[in-house]
Every structure is written in structure tokens, then in C-alpha cells.
Amino acid sequence: MTREPLLTPMLRQYQDLKARYPGALLMFRLGDFYELFFEDALVAARELDIVLTSRELGKGRRVPMCGVPHHALTGYLARLVERGHHVAICDQVEDARKAKGLVKRDVTRVVTPGTVMDATLPQREHRYLVAITLTDGLAGLAAADLSTGDMSATEIEGPDADRRLAEEVARYDPREVLLAEDAEIGAPLADRYRVTRVEPWRFEPSVARRALTEHFRLPSLDGFGVEDQPAAVSAAGALIQYLKQTQMSALDHLRGLRVYSTDEVLALDETTRRNLELVRNLRDGTAAYTLLSAMDETVTAMGGRLLREWVLRPLMGIDAIGTRQRAVAAALDARGLRAGVRAALETLPDIARVVGRVGHGSATPRDLAALRAGLVRLPQVCADVAQMPESRLVDLSGLIDPHETLAEHIGRALVDDPPVTARDGGVIRVGYDAELDGVRTAATDGKSWIAGLETAERVRTGIRSLRVGFNKVFGYYLEVSNANRQLVPADYVRKQTLTGAERYITPEMKEREAAILGAEERMSEIELRLFEGLRQDVADRAGSLLDTARALAEVDVLLGLAEVAERWRYVRPELVADPVIDIREGRHPVIERILQGERFVPNDLALSAADRALLIVTGPNMAGKSTLLRQAALIAVMAHMGSFVPAAAARIGVADRIFTRVGATDDLAAGRSTFLVEMQEVARILHGATQRSVIILDEVGRGTSTYDGMSLAWAVVAYLHDRIGARTMFATHFHELTELADLLPRVRNISMQVREEGDHVVFLHTAAEGRADRSYGIHVAQLAGIPDEVIGEAKRILQRLESAAARPADPEAARLPSRARQGRQVPLALDLTSPLEEALVGLAIESMTPLEAMQTLAELRDRARGLRADAGSRRERRLQ
């Protein structure tokens, strides 16, 4: 912003502050409003849809201006930040009554998308700020939720570090990503997240390490286990510097750094999380009808956030999973204790976020009152949890510190129902501080004298209508009507003339007034000082309070999982090292809720990398293929979380990754068609899966021509079987693929059953061994409301196609549309007599690389096109 040569002192102050924060909108406190000027006003007026005005500079010159009331700042600020803006909040930093000349102002914090702390935050979601660095196959990531003090870091190494880093960033779903100004970033990260560039030197390992040790007040980082992870240190150090720079507070609640390995958790890439609708549904992006919503019986916001983390970060260690399972089982058995603990937890405040606001310096008296009310309930919670006979729950009870001394201190200091802000006064309880009580007495005595003054003066002067009043301009005064002016005593001093009255003061009144107003000002100063001391007392215990909050959150989650298990008849799955999935009477955890009283049809499922690695799932549309696939994956996710699962029994082999390829999506902005997106997702699976993975594939190959799609699907199944051996479910309408069960030893067929009743089809939603030979697509189209004329014609065409496939020489086939003739599905293993078919049979697909397979398919396709062209030429010659 160019500096105007002729500005008022206030606008010069504005421009000087703006120059220090050039990338932020500057909201400048003027009285009861936050104002913006110049270019910032133009942007804010447009983004907030508020009136743009102007301010006089003199000689007819004006500058753009807009503003919002200070009491409504939170809502307007949230709108600006959600649109990606950084906003610098400028407040008065000295008392206007004591200022000489222009009131001193300064920026007190900078609010960015990743550092929002106000009431607009979703209660059951973290709001992460992430810093990342990537150099020569070594990636570092650090994440912090400023509202809760949660801070973690990891390091990723290897040739695919960039891909794994992107997956880990997506798991956090950050509102803001920090990058060095000279760092290169891939398009997916740049397009999806709000990226903030910072100076590269902030990521320098020595600078970053010093920033961390200074913040944590430690000589080294050995205690965090991060000393030998330079990339993680770089990211975490840059992150803490950015928070210090923008928040301008001690950040006392950021007391620890959790260092973890991505190998500790089950890998769920973004596509899998989206397709399985783990925390957001595909319809409107909310948590409704997701796995999270089906499992969430937590009663605290802290527990809700932790459950969300568990859903997105299932465990891989059998021992760690077993620890959670045993805790859920113990809570399930202790029904009475569980109910009592949950009732107590439900009354607790969000301790983590209260402590976050304390460390940030923005906690209010009501925050501390709520904290105290929660702390006094914790001794009973500890006692009840300790009675549940399971080591993890007993350990958690030991981590819950009621902080009885702190609770008692807050109770002695604060009034029962404190005001919103400490500056309003009336915060500190009588009897807490002798100095404050003395000043209060002086103020009360003065007000009592003023209250009695009116009666005394009426008696002394004989003026029955005399009254005592007060305003901010003149202070206390005596008002006498003009009709009684002759009765005014000589010691009254005229102060103000009104239309029908005169206002007076006396020397004694002014003395009392000075004492009263001085006492009130002194009271405000003392109360604010005492409250800030109380808030610091809480901040000094931030680390222990946050440990208590985390323990309470885990208790809430474990008891909530027990509640879900009891209510919906879930069972404890057996976790084993062998790559198997054996589910008896499994159910979809979300759909069975949606049915609302209707019975969900359960299904058995068996997969084993040893002899039953790949299931070809066929059956009609709407019969439940996709439900069965997702159901298997969701049960696997739940088992890895340590939760019980919706089944009669389940035996789950621990996986390293779960992959899904479901549905039709495109990315038109990036120039990627539906089929290209599908193939890229399949390629990602084929390159990343291992024998320990679980793979869900639905309708691979349907986005291109029948022959192309069928050939690709066939080759993908063969590659998964021969090269990878992962537990795979492959749903398809290419019924020809069922022949693979006869050719490949670890492929099996299952199909969704139907019952035909005349012209109607009843979907049984039951999976059985064997293959299906029909898709009933026309029946589904009829259910969807396709006109009867179209349905009738479709049935006639289907009959002709099926007849033509069975009797290729049938002259009726010549009457079909050319596209229908070209698109009919031809069994791949029937009467292999042509050279092309013999070439297919002779392919050594088991030893082919994916590239060789694609090249061979291209050659076969060219030969097929040549044969088709020759056949067309011969047909034309016969017709002639």
C-alpha cells in the first residue's frame, strides 16, 4: 500500500501498522468498532457484504472505509478467515483516559485459517495447522491444534516419501499448510489446501531446534525422541515460530510434542477414506451416515475428537489393539459403573479447549468457572473408572488429576456467576483480596453518602423536587427546577443550564465523586490483575490439565464403544497375524441404522491369502454387492481401531493398508476423465499393495468399451492373484470374469442372490458361493421410472443380443444396431478357435509386467480391429 502524503495522525498510525503486516487485513479498533481503510476496506466490504463508506482527508479528498461492531467481531472474523484471509487485530494498548494525544494501538494477534480460536470452531473436530518439508526423499511433517494444545510430528523416508507425506497431510485435513518460500509443492497439495509461505530460514534445523528448546524450556529434544529426525525437527520448529509470530502470546498450553511413526497405523489413503465414508459422506460432506456417526456414543467434545482420530488412524499392532479391546470389554461388563461415569462426563466442559484459551491468553472468567465446575466432579469419575477391572482403564483413572487445590483456588477467587469479561468488573469474590475489599468499601461508602445526599439537601433547602443525578460528562450533580431557583443555597455552583432546570455541584460532592470514581477505577485494575494471576495459575498447570483431558477423552471413547457394542449387538473380533478375513453374519454398521426397524440381512465372508485370496462378486444391480464390499472394509477398520464389530463372530488378519476403488468420479478441472481417474486409482493400488493389504474393487473397467474394460479387469485380477496375493473383493458385471475361478487357484466366485417371481425380481441381499449370469439392469431401470416404451424396446434388444451371442450366425443379429453388435459381451473361454482367441489363451499373464500387459492388449486390439474391418469388407462384397 502506497503511503498517502497528507494523512491524519490516526491514518498514519494505521498505515504504519499495516506496513508491518502487508499480507493481512488490518482491523483497527476505533471506539466501539473495528475499522478497515484503503484497499483493506474494499476487500472486507466485498467479502462481508457490508457498506463501504469513506473518511475525510481534507480538501475534498476521502479514503475508503468500512467497519464492524466490536461485539460482533467473531462472526465477521470467521467469514474472512474461511475465505482464506489473514486478519491482523489491532487494539488499544493504553487507557484512553490516560493517553496524551493519539491513543497507542498495536496488533495483538494475527488470525489465519489454521489459528482460529473463537466459538466458531467445530466442537468435535480438530483444526490443524500443518508445516511440511521435503528434501531428497526425506519428509518432515508437524501438526498443531492451537485450540487444544495438541502438537505432533513425524518423519517419512524413502523413494515414495512425497506420496506418503501427501497421504499424511490429507489425514490431518489441515486448514492451513506452512511451506518455505522456495519449496516446491505438488499440484494436489497446492490446489486443496490454503498454503502460507514463510521464510526458508525458519526450517533450518539449527534454527528450528533452538525455537523448540526455547519454547519447551529444555536443553535438548531427547525427551521427545526427535533428535535423530532432522526433517521432523525442521517442520515442528517452523510451526512453533509461526504460532509465536501470529499469536503474540506465551502459548503455555503447547507443552509437549508427540513424535510418531506412520508405520504404527493402518494406512488409509484419501480415496479409501472418501469411498468408505469414514468421517464425511459423499452426499453433502457432513458426518451424517458415516462410520464415525454410527460409532459415536461419546458424551464430551474431547471424546468426540479422539474417536474421530481413531477412525482415521486405526492401529496395526495386535497388542495395542488388544489393550483397547479389553478395556471395551470391561466397560461392557460394568454396565452400572459405565452409566454413572458417562453421566458425569456429560456435565464436563471441554477442558482441552478451556486450557487452550488460557494458554492463548483469551480465556474468560466464565471459562475458569466452567473449569472449576468440571474439576470438582473428577474425584468420583476417577473412583468409578478405577473399579473397572482392566489395566488400561485403571491406568487412565491414575492419569485423571482432579487438581483439587486449583479448583479450590478458583472457587475462592471467582463469584458464582461471573460476567463475560474481566474488564466488566464483579469477577472476584468478596473476601478473596483485602486490598480489593478495602477499595470496595470506600466506593460503597461514597455511593451511600451520594444516595443520602438527595434527602439531606431536600430538607436543608426546602426544595422538594431536588434530585441527584449522574452522567459521564459532568459526573454527579444536583438538579433544581427553574421554579425553585430562588431557594438554591449560596454554596451551590452552577454547572449546566437546561430548558427548565439548572444543575449544580458542591465542593464536597466533587470530593466524594473523585473518591468514588477513583475507587471504581482502582477496583477494575485490581480485579483484572487478580483474574490474570488466576489465569496464570491455570496456565502453569496446563500440561497436567491437558493430560487429564486426554485421559478423560479416552475413557469417554472406550465407554462409548462399549455402549455401541451393547446397543447394536457387536462382538469382539479376533485379531491375528495371518492374512485372513473370516466374518460370520456380518452387517453394515451404517446401513443397519438407516433401516430403522427393518432387518438387515447378514452375510458370511471368508478370505485368505493362502487359498481364497480373491473373490469375484457378481449379481444384479441393487442386490447388495457394493454394500457387501464396503461392509467388509468397514468391519476391518473397526477391528483395527480396537472396537467391537457388527457380526456374530469375526477373525481379522492385521493389514498394512486398505485400498478401495469404488464409483465413478472425474476431475475435469485437471483434465482427467472418469476412466483416467479410475485407472490412476487402480495403478496406485497395484503399485502400493502387499500381501497384507485389503483391497476393494468395484466395477473396474466399466468406463471404456466392453472389450477394453473386460480385458483390463481380467488382467488386473490376474496381476492381483499372481503378483500381490492380497485379500481382494472384486465386484463386476463382466460375468466372463467368473471363469477366472476355473483358471486361477486362489480365485473364488460369490454372487448376490435373487428370486424371480413372474415379471418381478426379489433381491435377497444374500451372498452365496457361485457365479451370477444376469445383472437385471432392465428391471432396475424400470424401478427407476424409465418409460415403459424404453423398457420394452430394451427387453427386445436384450433378447436379440443374447440370441446373437448364443448363435453368432443368426441372421437376426444383422438387424441389431451396429453399436449393440459391437458392444455385446462375448464369453472369453468358449470355442477358442480363431487366431486371436488362440493368442489370448497363449498369453503368459502370470509373468507379464503391467507395461507388457498393456502393450500386448494394444497389439491384440489392433489385430481385432483389423479382423473386424476385413469382416466388414467381406460383408459389403456379399451384399453387392
Image (cartoon, grey):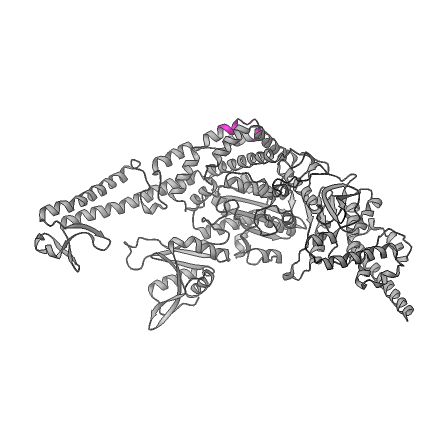
Q: Report the side of 625 relative to 642 (left or right).
A: right
Report whether residue 787 is seen.
yes
Tell me if residue 42 comes above or below residue 394 in the rendering: below
Q: Position of residue 509 (x, y in %)?
A: 16, 49
Tell me if residue 377 comes above or below residue 78 in the rendering: above
Secondary structure predominantly adopted by residues drawn in magenta? helix
| Location of the N terminus (image quadrant) | bottom left
Q: Quadrant of residue 65?
A: bottom left
Q: Report the side of 848 relative to 624 (left or right).
A: right
Asked if residue 5 lies in the magenta stretch, the reply is no
The front one of 678 and 628 is: 628
Task: Give the residue drawn at x 48%, y 37%.
Answer: 346
User: What stretch of residues is rendered in magenta?
Assistant: 383-392
Tell me if residue 25 comes above or below residue 298 in the rendering: below
Asked if residue 385 lies in the magenta stretch, the reply is yes
Report whether residue 656 is seen.
no
Q: Report the side of 313 relative to 67 (left or right).
A: right
The front one of 812 and 499 is: 812
Q: Please, which residue is most extreme toward the bottom here?
A: 59
Q: How many marks?
A: 0
The front one of 544 and 391 is: 391
The front one of 181 and 576 is: 576
Q: Position of residue 88 (x, y in %)?
A: 43, 56
Q: Quadrant of residue 504?
A: bottom left
Q: Position of residue 269 (x, y in %)?
A: 64, 48
Q: Report the side of 593 relative to 579 (left or right).
A: left
